[in-house]
Image (spheres, rainbow, N blue to C red):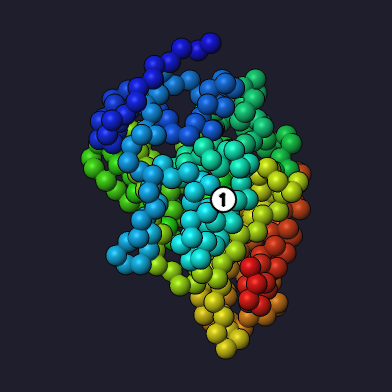
Amino acid sequence: MTPFAYERATDASSAVARVAAHPNAVFLGGGTNLVDHMKLGIAHPQLLVDVTRLPFSKIESLPDGGIRVGAGVRNSDLAADRTVRERYPVLSQALLGGASGQLRNLATTAGNLLQRTRCAYFQDVTVPCNKRTPGSGCSAIDGHNRDHAILGASDQCVAVHPSDMAVALAALDATVVVLGRQGERRISAVDFHRLPGDAAQRDSMLEHGELIVAVELPALPVAAHSVYYKVRDRASYAFALVSVAAALEVRSGRVHDVRIAFGGVAHKPWRARRAEAALRGAPATEEVYGRAADAELADAKVLKHNAFKIPLARNTLRMVLRQLAQGGR
């Protein structure tokens, strides 16, 4: 057994100070990902600071009509919240599409954002992985890479981000609120996760010691007409091969507003800006949906085993847009 110290935080500021002062300390929330990594020998924290008792377990209305979701809100509670189901159905559906009911009862909003890749090479400590051991190489590039990235990858890493919730948050223009030694700062959900570049070991823009305290969703009328669609190898408890979070508003046969993000295709939730630009103001037709998908996937680069992801992503986006335009979810 690998020894570690455990402390329970009494307030957010002291928790931040404690972790920031210790180079090998981490926050402990639901622990559904961290504890697995400790068992696998991927993570070796010397100190766990438990933040589950901090007052971040509420879903609150904001003055501008949006909502603030505390970092400690459980995935099951967030998915079941009436306001979320009515005004942000894409988020509720994304949460219900991930993991089992038991895990959703334990997993937190912050922890979901901080999930690490399920790349088999990352989870196998006997093989090289730049994300786990920087500079050791990426075994997936020439290995079994069926589940891996087609957008935004580098020669350092081709892994994909596993979270369903984070894809919905990227599509919804959410904001992640974090607390650090210098106080509070706000990070767009689109920018919160990062592409691998030459530092594949870094998943997000968080600095050591920064604690997620909330996620804020803006008042976004188009979000009420949104959907999350996930393509996977089996009907439940599987990570996405490709997923689409989309919100669409059509007026007089033309796209008035649209938000799109892909999951399962990149190191981070992939906001489809090119597709959105191709759709806004254009006729809501199959031809336009196809052109929008092609614009977003134009720079896709495939590996030996994952070329199927390009047509899969294209067809999934077209189907989702068609269903939304017809009034379906």
From this view, report whether residue 137 is shown above or below residue 300: above
Residue at 28% across, 30% down: 10
Residue 263: percent from left, percent from top: 60, 52
Residue at 57% across, 21% down: 39
Q: Nearer the viewer, residue 90 or 146?
A: 90
Q: Which residue is mark 1?
A: 95
From this view, report whether residue 325 is shown above or below residue 68: below
- The reply to whether residue 289 is visible in this rendering is no
Residue 121: percent from left, percent from top: 65, 30
From this view, report whether residue 20 is shown above or below residue 103: above
Identity of the residue furthest to the bottom in this view: 252
- The reply to whether residue 99 is visible in this rendering is yes
Q: Nearer the viewer, residue 213 or 104?
A: 104
Report the label total: 1
Residue at 48% across, 20% down: 44
Residue at 44% across, 21% down: 45
Residue 91: percent from left, percent from top: 53, 57
Q: Residues within 10 Å of mark 1 (few under 14, many from 20)?
A: many
Residue 249 found in image quarter: bottom right
* Lateral position of residue 23 relative to residue 246, left or right: left
From this view, report whether residue 313 is shown above or below residue 71: below
Residue 63: percent from left, percent from top: 29, 65
Label 1 sits on a secondary structure element that is helix
Please state, as top left, top right, bottom left or bottom right, where the C terminus lies in the image.
Answer: bottom right
* Lateral position of residue 285 relative to residue 182, left or right: right
Residue 6 found in image quarter: top left
Q: Nearer the viewer, residue 323 or 315?
A: 323
Amino acid at pointer 1: Leu
